[in-house]
Amino acid sequence: NGFSFDFIYMSAEYPEYLNAGFNDTFYAIVERPASGFRRNISYDDYGHEIEVDSAFFENPPVTNLAGTGYDIDCGEGDPCGSSTGWLRTSFSIDPGESFSITFSIHDEGDGVYDSAVIIDNFTWSPNPVEPGTILI
């Protein structure tokens, strides 16, 4: 009846590119060939994609990013990176339905700083699921 996966989005674009409009973005795109459905299923409560301006992004950072490369100090204790914290996206699929999911992260207009996503705990659900993305 559905699936879920956990992920964390980390970016060195924090804090320089807050509200800049061209941040690295993470998408989880589901395609359902039988219906022509094709859509990103990972977004915040306001419908924004996952990037440094999403409602899930930690400002200031609270997730322990030690050793990730996104834990750099820009001087005087100011961070040069942050993350969303761990999130879970869930989505409904009809039993027996064919579909594909594409995970994508890419630059939106610049190539200056890097971002990364770690995906974990992909799980099938025999029960109906509530589509959306939540903080876990």
Image (tube, rainbow, N blue to C red):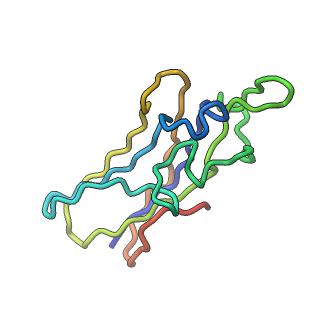
Q: Residue furthest right?
A: 76
Q: How many marks?
A: 0
Point out the image quarter for the N terminus: bottom left
Point out the image quarter for the C terminus: bottom right
The picture places residue 38, in percent across and down from the top left corner, at: 25, 55
The picture places residue 119, in percent across and down from the top left corner, at: 49, 46
The picture places residue 33, in percent across and down from the top left corner, at: 15, 57
**Residue drawn at (52%, 55%) of the image:** 6
> Image check: 61 left or right of 111?
right
**Residue drawn at (70%, 46%) of the image:** 59
> Image check: 88 left or right of 135?
left
**Residue drawn at (46%, 25%) of the image:** 110
**Residue drawn at (50%, 35%) of the image:** 23
> Image check: 34 left or right of 118?
left
Q: Residue furthest left?
A: 34
Q: Taking 13 as reference, is 31 above or below it? A: below
The picture places residue 15, in percent across and down from the top left corner, at: 67, 34
Q: Residue furthest front?
A: 20
